[in-house]
Image (cartoon, rainbow, N blue to C red):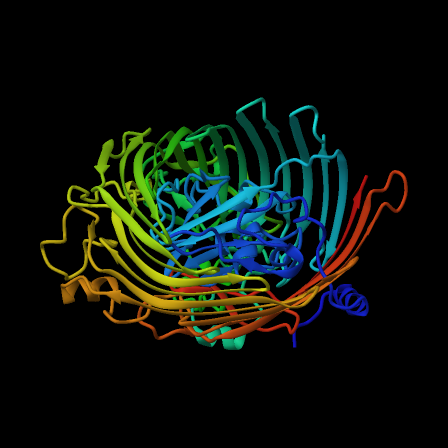
Amino acid sequence: MRSVPKGKSALFGASLAILTFHAPLHAEDSETDEAAVDAGTTIIVTGVKAAYTNNVTTEPMMLQQTPLTSPLSMIDNLPGVQVQEGDTFGFDDWSTTVALRGFQTNLDEQQVGITIDGLPNGGSNYGGGSKANRYIDTMNIGSVAVSQGTADIGSLSNEALGGTLDFRTSDPLDDSRIRFSTSLGENDAKRFYVRADTGDLGGVKAWVSASHQEATDWINNAAENERDHIAAKFVAEPGLVRISGYASYDDTQEDNYQRVFSAADFAAYPEWDQLTAEWSGIPYIDQSYRKGWSTLRENAFTYLKAEADLDAVELSAAAYYHHNKGRGDWVPPYIVDVVDDMGGAESEITGNSTIMGGSPIGRIYFIDGNGVALTATPGCVSSITFPYGGAGPEYDPACYAAGAIGAQSYRHTHYEKDRYGFTANASWTASFGGVDNQLRGGIWYEDGKRKEHRDWHQIVDTRVGFEYENPAYWRQYDREYPQSTFKWFAEDEVTFGPVTATFGIKQFHNEVEREDNFGASPNVSLSKTSDILLSGGVQIEAMPGLDLFAGYAENYKALGDEILERPNADLDLLEPETSENWEAGVRYSSGRVQASAVYFNTKFDNRIIFLAANTDAGPDYLIGTNGTYFNAGGIDSEGFELLVNAEIVPGLSGFASYTYIDATYKGTGDPLVDAAVGIIPGNRVTGIAKNMFVAGLDYNYGPFRAGISGKQTGDRFVNIANSFVAEGYFTVDAYIGVRGEEIADMLKGIDLSLVVNNIFDEDYLGGISGGGAWIGAPRTVVFTATLDF
């Protein structure tokens, strides 16, 4: 059984006494998607009518998550979707994984596009990327649209191999209102939120919001997680033009979770990721100190949009700007020796300036009081057994004379990005006899620069704590990565009778450079233009409420700047990754029932693989002094998705979905290369469950609402060899809430809610990346009170 921190059992007991209800009014402000139906009778809709699969979350689905929770968690019950995070609240971007039909976004892969109100997020990787939780407060979300596979041709992303997630902010209200909300939960979780809506001021309306939330980790309550978020949005409709603007600022500090790298470790420690809560004073042990594993990020994002409907012609344009700044921390159990001090005091320890660049000549583990490096006693055997199987004598203070002081670094990797862009779209609709035709097209341009440098700070005194010296003793590298994107697309849609057919083309041009500020590596520039990428499909209204559809799309992922981080790798023959997506299905929507069934088949090609120079794969691949990147192999994925939701009786709705995905690796065509990079053709793709099933019930009548849902996630493989299995798991979420309106002249509304995630406290492995898996979040309870004035 899990040990319960002080206060946790009392909160859980009180929560159950209130029943198992859930979250506040945070979705009630939402703009209503044109495909959505009454939120009280449905969990999910099957999206807009199109030749591709698309689903949209609605209020009951959002109510299964708390205001403390990351926006990403709201899509986890959609067909074909997996979302796993290190804890229920989504604190820790490091451990967040998202998958759509075999395509993944995690530490290693970025294959799923993310947009904010249709505008690009700038990438989702850890080193300078930003997922949706950096742009939007959960209580400001209007809806989330998921376009699996073929997606919309106009989607703005450089990494949408497997589809796009569009997170939509809610519009300002027509009536003025001030909302206060407070959430309290386990693991010292607390959140405070305020939003003011101006109401309609003669064609202009706006809102501004601010929130603060914090929590510790669920494993040993050692983390210090905090997030501050400020946002504002306005909408103005002077005549034929609709103008809207949005701005947000997010400041987050997260202490990370660690992965489990073997089934034996998880069996032995199903509720511990082997990071520690206390500072021991022994550097080798303290490299696992949780507060030393941190992510710090600031994100500022703003856009301005204009849309005009001129009868047969529709025009839209938008401009945006994004600034990202942050840091990733770690506490290596040594000082890097960069300068040969000829046996004297180590300048990395006694100096007061930063060594710029250079290569390591060794490591310093222990020093005397004068800063002179010490050597372990010959023949000494270390008694340290934690972490990573134990340490050699050089790490053990018992292998040094009395008075030896441990030497340890606080390593910072600094990230910064500025990007700006614009997009413009136009459509023209006309009728020719009995045929309706819509022609649309658009362009997207983005320019930006990512900066990254790494520095190493000396920990002041490892016997006391992990406070570190400034300035850093060594700046290891300093680089900048200018990059730009240009995309154009055109699509024609023809409707004749019950049949609608579409055909479209798109193309990307991307440039990325490396500028080494130390001159330690040559500057490099890559320029790639994609082939003309095709998409199209057909939709047939077989009878009222019943649609048949089929679609095809070629998708593309631009070369990212991460491939330029290996200075000597040969990139001459490298091509961007591509995918082909086929799907066919049926949608049914009539009265109280909605349902859909979809078959999909995707082929991911040109997979970028790095092969180190010391392998035996053959001379064709050993180019450059530290290996090469090349395109080989990929992934085949096929399966089907079933979905049904229905109003059982007035106020009570039910939902169920089933997903089957068979995703396997394709070989490179060279057995030696396959062996060198660990690919076994035909093995299942890591992190992807073959079977997923979701079922839920929601009740909404008068002032009361309640709901419960369960999700079964099948077995997944953690490593490419398929020897480490994360066993399937079943989690249940429940919510209950009550609302009141016009309680007093000033008080327009009150809402009390309670959410219980993973109500049966299932132990399981969650997100998977890099051959390891994070432990899934335990049962978590959050109570929220919301007041409207």
Quadrant (top left, top right, bottom left, bottom right) of the N terminus: bottom right
Q: Residue at x 57, y 31 (%)?
A: 247
Image coordinates of residue 299 in percent, x first then y, are: 53, 36
Between 232 and 146, the one lying in front of the other is 146
Residue 345 as seen in the image, left or right of residue 593? left
**Which image quadrant for residue 30?**
top right
Q: Residue furthest front?
A: 433
Q: Residue at x 65, y 51 (%)?
A: 68
Q: Residue furthest left?
A: 619
Above or below: residue 12 compared with residue 748: below
Q: Residue at x 22, y 37 (%)?
A: 529
Residue 124 as seen in the image, left or right of residue 755? left
Q: Residue at x 52, y 25 (%)?
A: 241
Image coordinates of residue 478 in percent, x first then y, are: 37, 33
| Residue 733 can be seen in this image | no
Quadrant (top left, top right, bottom left, bottom right) of the C terminus: top right
Image coordinates of residue 539 in percent, x first then y, are: 36, 55
